[in-house]
Amino acid sequence: MNQDVMTACEWVMVCDATDIPENGGACVKVEDVQIAVFNFARRNEWYATQNLCPHKQQMVLSRGMIGSAGDNCEPKVACPFHKNTFSLQTGKCLSNDELEIKVYPIKVENGKVYVSLE
Ligand code: FES
């Protein structure tokens, strides 16, 4: 994400970095919105998406398996229910063109995780 966008965000502190398992995710709530936060430690990257899987409207994406897809190693999460796979960078579904999820800006500073819902 470019620096101008990052600085324009209104950040909300959602948890300690240690609350999120390495190479896994956890759900946090911001203003009634469930956000899946992923600590992709293998790549030293963090991602935030909606927790709702749009396939069957299940709040499960934070429990999905994360990994990398394709030649460009796109970071992805697979829904634990029916394995639809979503890009953690763009939110596009990599296995079904009709599905998409929201992705949110995320940063970690001084051991705290911040997300922007804008
Ligand atoms: S509910 Fe997520 S793939 Fe079906």
Image: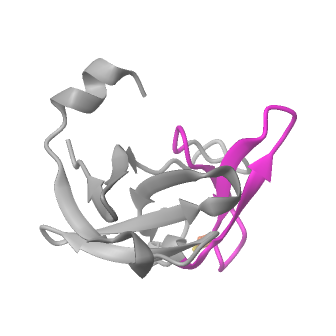
Asked if 74 appears above or below 32 in the picture, the reply is: above
Q: Is residue 27 left or right of residue 24?
A: left
Toward the viewer: 95 or 25?
A: 25
Residue 73, compared with residue 117, is above or below; it is above
Which residue is located at x 34 percent, y 43 percent? 105
Is 5 left or right of 78, judged from the image as shown?
left
Confirm whether the magenta stretch covers residue 58.
no
Locate residue 5: give its quadrant: top left
Q: Position of residue 8 (x, y in %)?
A: 17, 28
Question: In the rendered view, would you say 5 is above or below 39?
Answer: above
Q: Nearer the viewer, residue 1 or 99?
A: 1
Which image quadrant for residue 57? Answer: bottom left
What range is drawn magenta here? Answer: 63-91
Picture colour scheme:
one colour
Whole-percent x and y of residue 97? 65, 42
The residue under the point 46% across, 51% down is 101
| Ligand 1 falls in quadrant | bottom right
Q: Residue furthest front?
A: 110
Q: Position of residue 76 (x, y in %)?
A: 66, 53
Locate residue 17, reporting x and y percent: 39, 69
Task: Please identify the quadrant where the N terminus is shown.
Answer: top left
In the image, residue 77 lies in the stretch drawn in magenta: yes
Left or right, 104 with respect to 40, comes to left
Of the 4 image quadrants, the one containing the C terminus is top left
Q: How many marks?
A: 0
Looking at the image, which residue sits at the far right? 71
